[in-house]
Image (tube, helix red, strand yellow):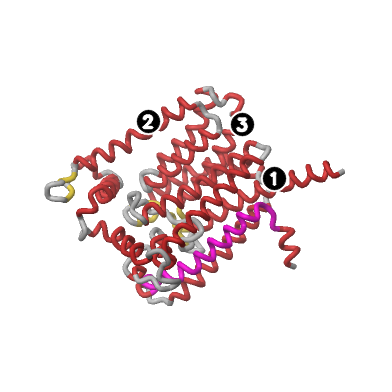
Amino acid sequence: MGGNLANKTKGDRVIWGIVVILTLVSLLVVYSSTGSLAYKYSKSTESYLFKQFAFIIMGVMVIYFAHRVNYTFYSRLAKLLYLISIPLLIYTYFFGAKINDGSRWIMLPVINMTFQTSDFAKLALFMFLSRQLSRKQPMIKDFKKGFIPIITPVVIICLLIAPANLSTAMLVGATSILLMFIGRVSTKHILATIAFASIPVIFLFAVSLKYYDKANNRPKELPAVFSVGRVQTWIGRVQTFVYGANEVNSEKLYQTNQAKIAIAKGGFFGKGPGNSEQRNFLPHSYSDFIYAIIIEEYGLFGAAFMVFIYLLFLYRCIRLYRKCPYAFGAFLALALSFMLVIQALANMGVAVNAFPNTGVTLPLVSMGGSSFLFTCLSIGIILSVARNVEQLEGNALAEVTV
């Protein structure tokens, strides 16, 4: 039976191994970090362990079935999924469940689970972008015929995600630009895009610095024009990040300070599995700040190991990109791997206070939800490309042998 399963499970074995390692880490750390959550809702930590285990089982099934599908099928689906994602994002903004002042989720009936539409939109966009890049290669340097059809879907999705989740929109934009650079899009067009996209970011930082009273060490009152949407939240996060070191008792800094304490307690070797103390004080220790708990329990060696695992995953996907003979598969594997690794680095950067708070999860490690399942779907699609490359190499080897 084991041999039969091995025969049916194809693709890059190293990536499969990374999935196993990250899901095992997820089980250990989620079980360790959900004590305060269990207390809050009068549940046992074992219930969250079983819930995470169930998500992992579902996720592995998603990976398995997605990797069995020929990746060219995703090319045919790409445009449809992209077109579906646009009204979904619009609906989510106006009618979605409001959590932390942001409309990011819609409630799925029957199963009663929240669904983050930006996860669906990211996957749909990168499928469609990979399709466009592969089809537009003959005229990729042309502004009208090459650049406009590629940048338009990126701009639309980023603008629709940004009002509720600016950090995700920025990560999607950065990943898209990186993919366009590899896809031979004209450098002057890419630089113009970066310059244009930098304007609102620079403006946000400028406003954040202007409306902060350094003498009294507190934010100034913002004009009414900045009360639209989540602009005040974005400004507050930038101010907390830039001036936070002076506001030790600030409520906004509570999460950051607790994460720093967890990291300091971890030292080089950590306190050991299940011995975290800051899990009882750190909000979202099982999702956004799970990396801080990993450092506390497994030390700097555990932290470095996590970085190594994600970089190894990226290396295997770059290797896959170079071996794939068809442009769509190559771009798709690269796009999805960039998306996951950049998200992982952003999450880890927030935990160590290298970036402002973003609210993104650590792929395959943070507590399960729709984001976890979409991560598994992305990995399944990458493995689908790897499986087909493996088959092509096997056929080529058979022909040489004959």
Q: Is residue 364 left or right of residue 231?
A: right
Residue 191, quarter of the rendered image: top left
Toward the front, the furthest residue is 268
- Residue at 60 percent across and 58 percent down: it is 62
Query: Dot 1, how many residues are within 10 Å of its Cα: few (below 14), some (14-19), or many (20+)?
Result: many
**In what element is the residue under mark 1?**
helix
How far apart in space, not on screen, are marks 3 and 1 (Cα)? 20 Å
Q: Residue at x 61, y 33 (%)?
A: 134
Image disc number at residue 389: 1
Residue 112: which numbered mark, if any? Answer: none
The image position of residue 301, as x and y in percent, is 45, 61
Whichever of labels 3 and 1 marks the residue nearer the N terminus, that label is 3
Comparing 316 with 334, the one in front is 316
* Secondary structure predominantly adopted by residues drawn in magenta: helix
User: What is the distance, in whole Å, between disc 2 and disc 1 at their CAs?
Assistant: 38 Å
The residue labelled by disc 3 is 135
Marks 3 and 1 in Cβ contact (< 8 Å): no
Quadrant for residue 159, please give it.
Answer: top left
In magenta stretch: residue 389? no
Give the amino acid type for the residue marked by disc 3 in the picture. Arg
| Marks 3 and 2, how far apart at CA | 26 Å
Query: What residue type is disc 1 on?
Result: Val
Q: Read off the residue under disc 2.
A: 196
Which residue sits at x=55%, y=68%? 54
| Element assignment for label 3 | helix
Expressed as whole percent of the image width and height from the top left, the position of residue 278 reads 34, 68
